[in-house]
């Protein structure tokens, strides 16, 4: 029995592994059935898609190749006989590029990226080294600071020598301190940016020119009449208003600077930028209320006369010194107030009492000669070439003098004038403006003034109701400014040669000018300034003129 039981256990052990393998075998067959049909189906689908695409392209190429005889004749007429030769190439290009394997595509992408890296590396090549270097160029040269022209730049006695770089930096610092900062024309970075923007705008204008059609005739550059395009800027002296009446405002003849002077005994200089107008410098003349101040023609000096003095001052801006000029020998005047400077910078004309005109040398400030008009002289003006002087008497007569001979060339009567107040000659020597106590400003041509005793004015400007106390022309002789100090807002700008008043100045029902004491235009008419009795130098930007 024990033997039979053992034999039964051995048979069961032998049968058990066989049964397990028999069960696993069907699983393997099932997996095989699942995987093999799926792969075959994918391959069949890919082949069918490729075959359909090839058939579609074949039909498309056949349709392109089957053209009628009329179409072929037209194509040969337009494209030439080479159409038949190039037809195969055209069909090949329409068929598209051949397929590239995935591995080949990856290689192409790698090659393109490598070529881009090589191109970037070529752009970042190192600069070439100079072929030859001079050792003397690299050596820093010292400058002797004990020289009389360089002593003022020494900060201590120990600085007997300075390198050229340090001296250049010190000169720049002093210039910026004198100008109140870096002027726009000296700022190289901003100038380069502005040039770039200008070039971009020019290219844009060229593109616009090519995009449109029509009338390309440019409008005239002359000032139009009617309305003057202008904007109000902050006062030129906003960093230092005068304590009292401001009697003089004048622009520098060459720099972007304006000068103000008033009864508060001070002369101030400001840099004009139309935004902040920083102060450059102020000088104070003790016990000397200023009646009039004026730049010299070269712009290096300021001449100032007082209200109750027989002397005057000269401020040398280069040396930074104030030179008092005591009583001039040969000039018997109790007070020296009104004066004029010749445009060539040679003469200074002092307007005295009892009709006397004293001609002084601008260089030595000594008397050259004296001239006399009938009655009392109220105003005078030089011609642009400094060869003649127009003097306006209180009786309404105008005397024309020759500067070289000091003789009266001609005399004429200002039409309707009861008392002469002010006179001005245009920069191009075309017009003479005479303002009288009645408020009428007569405008004459210089030719008629030299020939006739009673010339007819080309225009009688009657926009002022009180005495005309100030007249001035702009540098281009397109604007005549007339003003009266006896009533508020009494300033008018007259357009030349239409002789009409600009209707938008001063602004209607807005009180900002008050009593005008002095007026001036910048060297290129970009700005216009009015000094008033409130101690302010009002500043206006004339947009028709692009520069200062």
Image: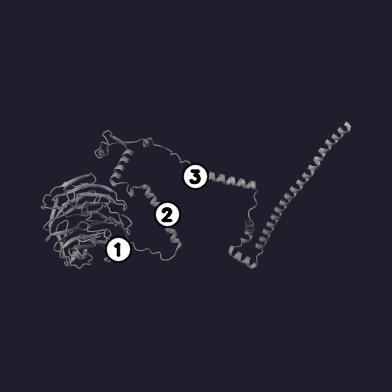
Q: CA distance from mark 1 to mark 2?
A: 34 Å
Q: Nearer the viewer, residue 533 or 450?
A: 533
Name the residue at the top extreme.
Answer: 2
Secondary element at tag 2: helix
Q: Residues within 10 Å of mark 1 (few under 14, many from 20)?
A: some
Secondary element at tag 3: helix
Q: Where does the image place residue 188, in percent across and percent down from the top left?
A: 36, 47
Q: Nearer the viewer, residue 163 or 103?
A: 103
State whether residue 388 is above or below residue 10.
below
Q: Where does the image place residue 253, in percent across and percent down from the top left?
A: 26, 52
On the rendered image, what quadrant is the C terminus found in? bottom left
Residue identified by numbered label 2 = 200
Q: CA distance from mark 2 to mark 3?
A: 25 Å
Residue identified by numbered label 3 = 123
Q: Residues within 10 Å of mark 2 (few under 14, many from 20)?
A: few
Which numbered dot is residue 504?
1
């Amino acid at each position: 029995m024990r033997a039979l039981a053992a034999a039964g256990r051995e048979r069961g052990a032998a049968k058990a592994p066989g049964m397990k393998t028999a069960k696993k075998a069907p699983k393997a067959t099932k997996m095989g059935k699942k995987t093999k049909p799926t792969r075959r189906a994918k391959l069949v689908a890919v082949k069918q898609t490729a075959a359909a695409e090839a058939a579609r392209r074949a039909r498309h190429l056949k349709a392109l190749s089957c053209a009628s005889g009329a179409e072929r004749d037209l194509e040969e007429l337009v494209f030439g006989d080479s159409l038949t030769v190039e037809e195969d190439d055209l069909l090949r290009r329409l068929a598209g590029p051949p397929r590239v394997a995935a591995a080949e595509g990856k290689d192409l992408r790698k090659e393109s990226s490598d070529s881009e890296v090589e191109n970037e590396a070529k752009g970042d090549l190192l600069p070439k080294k100079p072929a030859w270097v001079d050792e003397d160029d690299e050596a820093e040269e010292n400058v002797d600071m004990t020289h009389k022209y360089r002593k003022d730049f020494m900060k201590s006695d120990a600085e007997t020598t300075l390198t050229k770089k340090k001296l250049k930096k010190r000169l720049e610092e002093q210039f910026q301190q004198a100008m109140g900062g870096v002027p726009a024309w000296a700022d190289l970075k901003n100038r380069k940016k502005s040039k770039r923007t200008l070039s971009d705008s020019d290219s844009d204008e060229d593109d616009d020119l090519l995009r449109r059609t029509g009338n390309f005739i440019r409008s005239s550059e002359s000032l139009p009449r009617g309305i003057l395009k202008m904007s109000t800027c902050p006062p030129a002296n906003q960093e230092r208003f005068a304590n009292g009446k401001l009697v003089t405002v004048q622009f520098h003849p060459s720099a972007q600077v304006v000068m103000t002077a008033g009864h508060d005994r001070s002369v101030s200089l400001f840099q004009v930028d139309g935004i902040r107008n920083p102060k450059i410098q102020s000088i104070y003349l003790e016990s000397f209320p200023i009646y009039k101040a004026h730049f010299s023609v070269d712009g290096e000096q300021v001449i100032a006369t007082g209200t109750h003095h027989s002397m005057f001052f000269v401020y040398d801006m280069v040396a930074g010194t104030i030179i008092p000029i005591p009583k001039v020998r040969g000039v018997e005047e109790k007070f020296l107030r009104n004066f004029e400077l010749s445009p060539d910078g040679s003469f200074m004309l002092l307007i005295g009492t009892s009709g006397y005109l004293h001609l002084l040398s601008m260089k030595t400030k000594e008397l050259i000669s004296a001239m006399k008009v009938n009655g009392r002289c109220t105003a005078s003006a030089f011609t642009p070439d400094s060869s003649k002087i127009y003097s306006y008497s209180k009786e309404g007569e105008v005397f024309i003098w020759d500067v070289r001979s000091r003789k009266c060339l001609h005399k004429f009567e200002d039409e309707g004038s009861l008392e002469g107040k002010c006179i001005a000659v245009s920069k191009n020597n075309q017009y003479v403006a005479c303002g009288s106590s009645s408020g009428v400003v007569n405008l004459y041509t210089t030719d008629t003034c030299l020939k006739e005793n009673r010339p007819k004015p080309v225009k009688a400007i009657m926009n002022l109701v009180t005495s005309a106390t100030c007249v001035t022309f702009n540098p281009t002789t397109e604007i005549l400014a007339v003003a009266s100090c006896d009533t508020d807002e009494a300033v008018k700008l007259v357009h030349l040669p239409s002789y009409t008043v600009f209707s938008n100045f001063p602004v209607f029902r807005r009180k900002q000018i008050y009593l005008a004491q002095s007026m001036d235009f910048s060297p290129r008419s970009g700005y216009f300034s009015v000094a008033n009795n409130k101690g302010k130098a009002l500043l206006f930007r004339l947009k028709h003129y692009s520069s200062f």
